[in-house]
Image (spheres, helix red, strand yellow):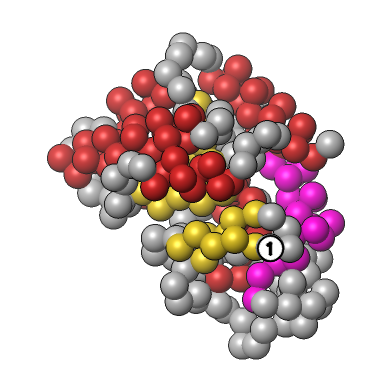
Amino acid sequence: MVGRPAWTRDPDHRILRAEAAAPQSTQTRVLAFGEPFPYSIDGARSDGTGYVLADDAAMRASRTRAIAKLQRPGAIDAASRGEALTRLAGTARRDVLVSQLGAALDALGAAGVEHAVIGGSMVDAKPNPGDVDLLWLDRVGVDAVDVERAMARVAVPDVSLQRATGIVLNAPTIPGAVPGSNFLEFFSSSRGGFARSPLLVPTRVGDMSASSIVDAAASALRRVLT
């Protein structure tokens, strides 16, 4: 993540992009509209402003890979909300972050989001993570504006939230992200290249097995594709 995102409306594609106040791009120039990014996945192309073209085939391909990876044993860790919050706590700093994470999950659930993914140092053994990297998973019927409004009502200064789709769209401005990569590919390794296991959680309280959580998230993403 590149700091705390500033939410802005994209009038062409009706999505919200979490754009940093000062994007850190690895590109030496802004590519022309439709020009493919070097070292991209599935030929992701530029929208002409430094981001990935939202209606490009690479976007659909990234979601297809995410669904396939979700259903691959061991590709992602999953836990009920209560189990996840208990697991991630344990130090004074982590307890503060977990409290904010719980409030963020409440807000996401109120906006209709059913699943979120926790990544970054919060899922490592680091005793004092700087923040919580949190993604909300796209679902049919969820309006990103409603998510923005719900999050604005809670005090979560250390939660860095982004839409899962944003990883694909904003990859050129995110250190370590490859244009065309999806949220699982991005969250599955640290900036130093070490493997990580992102944590998939429901936004609402309830007893669910890890497999049922993964199946539900994959099903929701699949409906977005159709």
Task: Kindly give the residue lying farthest to the bottom in the view shown.
Answer: 28
Q: Which residues are magenta?
A: 50-66
> Would residue 129 be found to the left or right of residue 219 on screen?
left
Residue depicted at 77% across the width and 32% down the height:
223
Nearer to us in this view, 92 or 125: 92
Nearer to us in this view, 174 or 139: 139
- What residue does disc 1 label? 11
Q: Is residue 24 visible?
A: yes
Q: Is residue 194 visible?
A: no
> Where is 14 relative to 108, above or below?
below
Residue 97 inside the magenta-drawn segment: no
Query: Residue 83, percent across and down?
Result: 38, 21
Quadrant where the C terminus sits is top right
Query: Residue 188, percent across and down?
Result: 54, 48
Residue depicted at 47% across the width and 30% down the height:
110
Residue depicted at 50% across the width and 59% down the height:
7
Nearer to us in this view, 17 or 208: 17
Residue depicted at 23% across the width and 45% down the height:
127
> Where is 18 relative to 164, above or below?
below
Instruction: Name the amino acid type tagged 1.
Output: Pro
Nearer to us in this view, 128 or 57: 57
